[in-house]
Amino acid sequence: MPDVFDEMHRRCRDGQPVALATVVATWHSAPRPPGAALLVAVDGTVTGSVSGGCVEADLYERARRVLDTGRPELCRYGISDDDAYTVGLTCGGVLDVFVERVDPGALPELNAVAAARRAGQPAAVVTCVSADAADAGGDPARRLGRRLALGGRRVLGSLGDDRLDDAATADALGLLAAGHSGLLRYGYHGQRRGSGLDVFVTAYATPPRMLVFGAIDFAAAVARIGAFLGYRVTVCDARPVFATARRFPEADEVVVRWPHRYLRAELDAGRVDERSVVCVLTHDPRFDVPLLEVALRHPLAYVGAMGSRRTHDERHKLLRETGLSSAQLARLASPIGLDLGGRTPEETAVSVAAQIVAARWGGTGRPLAALDGPIHRPG
């Protein structure tokens, strides 16, 4: 939730408390994943969303109440009764949402997270969202809303117990490595097999990377849609006359280098991981074959290559000669993209993005009207 965090940080710097509502658990066909958030400021300004509109009006009123009382609330929204106009998710699913007031006193933790994000480092906020009466002090409310912040190598704040802090920190780092937010359950002293406390880890992982090889007009469109999807986009080409920042203003960086050498260097440096996607748009075997050989030997999230079916067949033959296995070759999306019938660079970019999204979430690429079952797949 980068926009929500930035607004929360700004408001707290200005001395203003805010109410933060965060999705901490979902079931069935919930519209937004854990970590989705909505922020309500003292002046009534709203930033973010947790359901696409189904429960925001009710959450707004809860957030205003939490701003006044300072007491956090954990609320559940299920399927609404349309006839009775009850609050709920008209599209189905169940959401648990934690609503808390964040005061300017949290600024040290927020500053640590903000600094880590500016430096391109992962960060997380761990918040106690549920506590039962088994607390040794007899007052579970004193644990609700307590938080830890992990920013770079710094850990600030406390959940109320040193052993609990240690366990939650270790587990939050594991979630960060996977790029996921999530709910964790502990005993009051950090027992992983215990119960009594639920904490939610909001992960601010570094953005996944999209590497676009081939500085052509299609690459400009793919770079634009990649940035829109939240990727950190790199365009790489060995030809300096084409690989210029002016031609690719939406890219985070434009690199002039032989593609396979650049990708190998990024892999060796650990700057490309299992969340990264590679789009090869050059359809020139001098560039494509050595590049795809490197890409397909690593567990990247997606590897696609542009070209006609004839180009694909020839490229496939050359790749097999490099010693790639059938399983490795099967990971290649070629010709790149889904069959949308598009012709223009922008339409092609939509086709490529649709295939990347489908690969990430296990989608079929078929019309939803032709399928049964939940629309939103578990994430």
Image (cartoon, grey):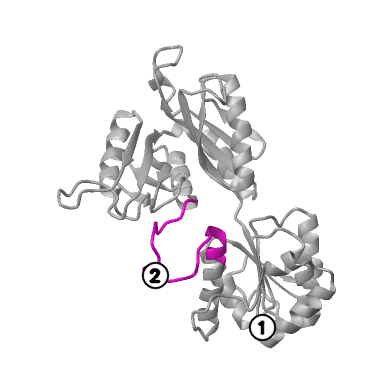
| Residue 369 x/y as whole percent | 36, 69
- The answer to whether residue 355 is left or right of residue 299 is left
Q: Quick one: label 2 or label 1, which is nearer the N terminus? A: 1
Q: Is residue 373 magenta?
A: yes
Residue furthest to the top:
137
Residue furthest to the left:
84
Badge 1 is on which residue?
A: 307
For this rendering, which residue is in front, 189 or 217?
Answer: 189
Residue 64: quadrant of the picture: top left
Q: Residue at x 28, y 38 (%)?
A: 62
* Residue 108 in the image: above or below residue 77: above
Residue 8: quadrant of the picture: top left
Q: Secondary structure at mark 2?
A: helix
Q: Main secondary structure of the magenta part?
A: loop
Q: Residue at x 39, y 58 (%)?
A: 373
Extent of the magenta region: 356-379
For this rendering, which residue is in front, 68 or 284?
Answer: 284
For this rendering, which residue is in front, 155 or 199?
Answer: 199
Q: Which mark is residue 370?
A: 2
Mark in front: 2 vs 1: 2
